């Protein structure tokens, strides 16, 4: 699910009153329709006297799904850029193994100080 703040809420800084009530051991508020989130989870934090709610960032796939598709011109430009880049692996090319262990000399392996 892509978490967007409603456009209507972004266009104006309207002020609306709502009710505060108890829900179990937590305090809760009713969020008016014009401020509702298109998300299941939100972050909450205090900023001075204000309490700010914002949608929780989703996965990379959700973020990409929310992007507008590329135009034909943008696709062509991306293809040209990718052809000019020689340091990228093809999607079907195996990733080379990299040895992350430090190289030890034969003297170090025998616990002999190197000269």
Image: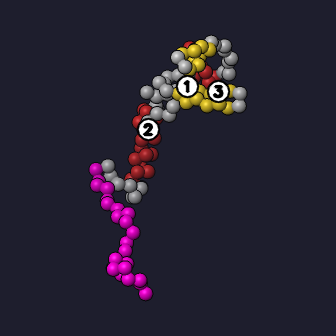
Picture mark count: 3
Q: Residue at x 38, y 63 (%)?
A: 100
Q: Which residue is drawn at 28% across and 50% down?
A: 92
**Residue marked by disc 3:** 51
Q: Residue furthest right?
A: 49
Reply above or below: 20 against 101.
above
Q: Which of marks 2 and 3 is in front?
A: 3
Q: In this view, does 77 lie to the left or right of 33?
A: left
Describe the element under mark 1 as helix, strand or loop.
loop
Residue 20 appears anywhere in the view: yes
Give residue 99's quadrant in the image: bottom left
Residue depicted at 39% across the width and 69% down the height: 102
| Element carrying mark 3 | strand
Mark before the other along the chain sequence, 2 or 3: 3
Question: Chief secondary structure of the magenta span?
Answer: loop
Disc sitting over residue 54 in the figure: none
Toward the bottom, the furthest residue is 115
Quadrant showing the N terminus: top left
The span picked out in magenta is: 92-115
Does residue 69 appear in the picture of this structure? no
Is residue 54 part of the magenta span, yes or no? no
110 left or right of 14 in image: left
Q: Which residue, given by chain and number where applicable, does mark 1 sit on?
A: 5
Residue, disc 2? 60
Residue 63 is situated, as x and y percent measured from the top left of the image, at 46, 35
């Amino acid at each position: 699910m892509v978490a967007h703040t409603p456009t209507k809420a972004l266009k104006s800084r309207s002020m609306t009153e709502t009710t505060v009530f108890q829900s179990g051991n937590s305090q809760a508020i009713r969020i008016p329709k014009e401020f509702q989130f298109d998300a299941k989870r939100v972050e909450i934090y205090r900023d001075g006297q204000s309490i700010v709610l914002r949608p929780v960032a989703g996965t990379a796939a959700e973020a990409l799904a929310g992007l507008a598709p590329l135009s034909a011109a943008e696709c062509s430009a991306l293809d040209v850029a990718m052809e000019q880049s020689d340091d990228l692996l093809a999607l079907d090319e195996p990733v080379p193994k990299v040895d992350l262990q430090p190289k030890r000399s034969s003297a170090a392996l025998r616990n002999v100080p190197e000269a």
